[in-house]
Amino acid sequence: MSLELQGMGVSRGIAIGRAHIVFHNKPDIREYLVDEDKIEQEVLRLQQATETAKSQLKSIRDNIPANAPTDVASFMDTHILMMQDSSLTKIPTNMIRTRRCNAEWALQLQRDALINVFDEMDDPYLRTRRNDVDHVVNRILRFLADENGHEHDVTEARLKGRIIIAEDLTPADTMLMQHQEVGAFVTEHGGATSHTTILARSLGIPAIVGVGSLRRYIQDNELLIIDGETGTLIAGADETSLAEYRERRNSFKQHIASLNRYKSGPTQTREGKSITLQANADLPEDITTISNTGAQGIGLYRTEFLYMNRTSPPEEEEQLAAYRKVVEGMNNQPVTIRTFDLGSDKTVDGGRNLNQAATNPALGLRAIRLCLKQPSMFRTQLRAILRASAFGKIRIMFPMLSNMQELLQAQHMLKQCMLELDHEGLDYDRHIETGAMIEIPASAICAEMFAKNVDFLSIGTNDLIQYTLAIDRIDDHVNYLYDPLHPAVLRLIKMTLDAGKKHNIPVSMCGEMAGDPKFTRLLLALGLDNFSMHPNALLEIKRVIHKTDMKQIPMNTLSIMDISDPYDAELFLEKINSHVH
Ligand code: PEP
Ligand code: MG
């Protein structure tokens, strides 16, 4: 009998493949006192679990694909070293012998002690190392709980074509899997614009989020069908369904192939209005896909990947090399480098502890706030970006600005870095443009103030929607409230576009809304003429633009900003789109 589960389809495409279950949640830990005569047996249990966990990790490490980033190996080496460290071997062993704790309990006590030390560190980067302790301890605990370790790790090799089933995936996990030609992702949690979802889209992998009780229903290695558009997962499908989905998979592939005819030539509406289409890059590897789509540059280069899955912060030279590679790979097309947007769900590594304490990290020390608090990290990045600007057209963009002071401070630091480089005789583009991301309602309302002080604005709808509607973008409990058509969201977008026009500076949109074809016409009607999106969406958007005649867009389109009922707004949108086939 087949079983159908429903979630939110967040990355289009059909996948048919076997389940690969990845659950990171901590195994349940029972705490008990070991009988005197069983103590040595318990010590042996701990040693064996640690040894098995270590050899599993070594084998994963030895099978890392050759094209994976070098940081991945050093990330794992650190974990292997930690497993050998006396803090995780001798100390828990002593606890078993002296306090008669069972192995899990001893390991857990030592974990807590180590985490306390990390938590007290002043350096935020070192503080995040606590995640490594968790990662390593959980791996050993999993072997203690289940000697066969039947749950996998995302870093395992041989994931080609597999359907990853997880409670949640961090952007760092997704990155680790990117080279393995994974078939699809399905998670219990997550939202349409969580960074993992965005990565899945940019990798062109079908994905579904928010499927409750996945773990209860899906078994490892089971054959599954995934529809990343409708959000449907089918287990135990019969031959008829399999044949139907194979057919749909083929037509989807054909549709994608048919878009290739849009690759060359300008992007214009039917009546000849030129539109700029740029791509978002999340990883250096995206450049190849981007060059293949005919994008007119990169409208958002997310630099956070430089910080993920590694044990030390990236130095100036390493960053320079990464930025230079991108700008040189783009053959004189502009590259908009966004300064680090770390924090919230983009923690510095595998970051399982997304919600440390009771604060909401999305409202916390994130993006420009974190950079201004960490001037040496920020300066290193600014210097690297500036130096890379000697090799091609680069623009700098600051994320999550909530007031003018943040922008002025960031620009001041940039100036200082320029003076330093002058002093050191290092080359850079003296006319480098700076831009502000508009992704907080306050800055959209005050977009004119920002417009007067920057060369361009870019609307980040993922965060703008999150903050306007007060819904955490990674929380599946509230993702039903995610609504790009909410009149408040549309009005803020319009205000930003109008501010750009009034002050004669370009405004682009780089949030996911820009890459969703159902909003293209509406955005054109609102006055947007520069879209930046994940590369896999670009040709589809170009197709819609080519099929749009602005004169045929209903006169009253902008009245959608007055529709309060989401259902009515959807119907209205359908009317606007009714001429696109
Ligand atoms: C956004 O918020 O819309 C955006 C483009 O930035 P990010 O998704 O990286 O937060
Ligand atoms: Mg954002």
Image: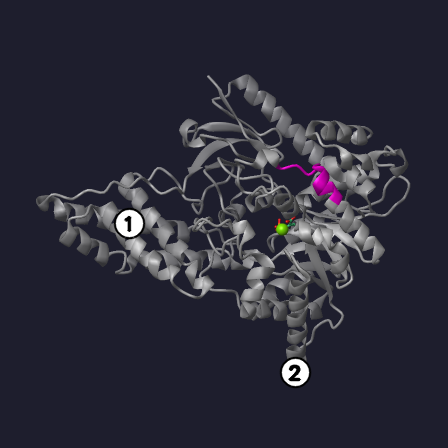
Q: Position of residue 87 (x, y in %)?
A: 27, 59
Magenta highlight on residue 157 = no
Q: Under tag 2, what secondary structure?
A: helix
- Residue 108 - label: 1
Residue span colored magenta: 482-491
Quadrant position of the C terminus in the picture: top right
Location of mark 2 (residue): 423
What crowding class fits label 1: few (fewer than 14 Cα within 10 Å), some (14-19), or many (20 or more)? some
Q: Position of residue 438 (x, y in %)?
A: 69, 53
Sequence-first disc among 1 and 2: 1
Please state if 239 lies on the left or on the right of 230 as rendered. Answer: left
* Mark 1 → mark 2, Cα distance in angstroms: 53 Å
Q: Residue at x 59, y 67 (%)?
A: 381
Q: Nearer the viewer, residue 1 or 470?
A: 470
Instruction: Name the kind of residue labelled 1 in the image.
Output: Gln
Instruction: Name the kind of residue labelled 2 in the image.
Output: His
- Residue 417 - label: none
Q: Residue at x 51, y 56 (%)?
A: 69
